[in-house]
Amino acid sequence: MRALRGATTIDIDSAEHMEERTIALLAEMFDRNDIDHGDLISIVFTATSDINSAFPAAAARKFGLGDVPLLCAQELDIVDGTPLCLRVLIHLNTERGRDELHHIYLEGARGLRDDLPE
């Protein structure tokens, strides 16, 4: 079992825009890591306190993950933290090592983990 991280930001707090960015993030994570739906264990989403238009898990269900355990939580409200930020933690079964996984950071979240290789 491994865990895969990702994050993105939204420009405005609207359900449609949050859904679009959440699906784009998940699609990139799945594509870059060749994730098979059957390998998924669970997915945890967090959102900063300035996002309250919709649950990221609702977007994940539209992406086809309705049978995967999904959880949403509020991110810590840290001074100078990245605003309008969605984060995701995917737990999956894989034989790949940690160094073979590609954590994905999009939009305004690109600088959150500049220590990770592309």
Image (cartoon, rainbow, N blue to C red):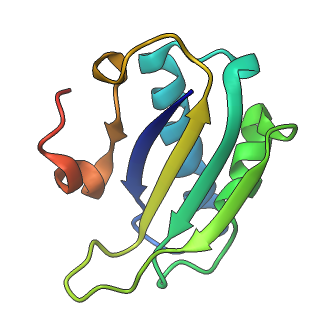
Q: Residue at x 51, y 10 (%)?
A: 95
- How many dots with numbers? 0
As drawn, the residue found furthest toward the left would be 115
Quadrant of image for the C terminus: top left
Residue 89 coordinates in the image, percent (x, y): 51, 47
Residue 9 coordinates in the image, percent (x, y): 38, 60
Q: Residue at x 59, y 37 (%)?
A: 91
Quadrant of image for the N terminus: top right
Q: Is residue 81 left or right of residue 85?
A: left
Q: Nearer the viewer, residue 56 or 14?
A: 56
Question: In the image, is residue 7 above or below residue 1?
Answer: below
Q: Is residue 70 left or right of residue 86?
A: right
Q: Is residue 94 left or right of residue 37?
A: left
Residue 101 coordinates in the image, percent (x, y): 37, 22
Q: Nearer the viewer, residue 35 or 27?
A: 35
Question: In the image, is residue 64 above or below residue 22?
Answer: above
Residue 43 visible (yes or no):
yes
As drawn, the residue found furthest toward the right would be 67
Residue 30 coordinates in the image, percent (x, y): 54, 24
Q: Is residue 80 left or right of residue 24?
A: left
Q: Residue at x 70, y 50 (%)?
A: 59
Q: Quadrant of residue 94?
A: top right
Question: In the image, is residue 44 above or below residue 77?
Answer: above
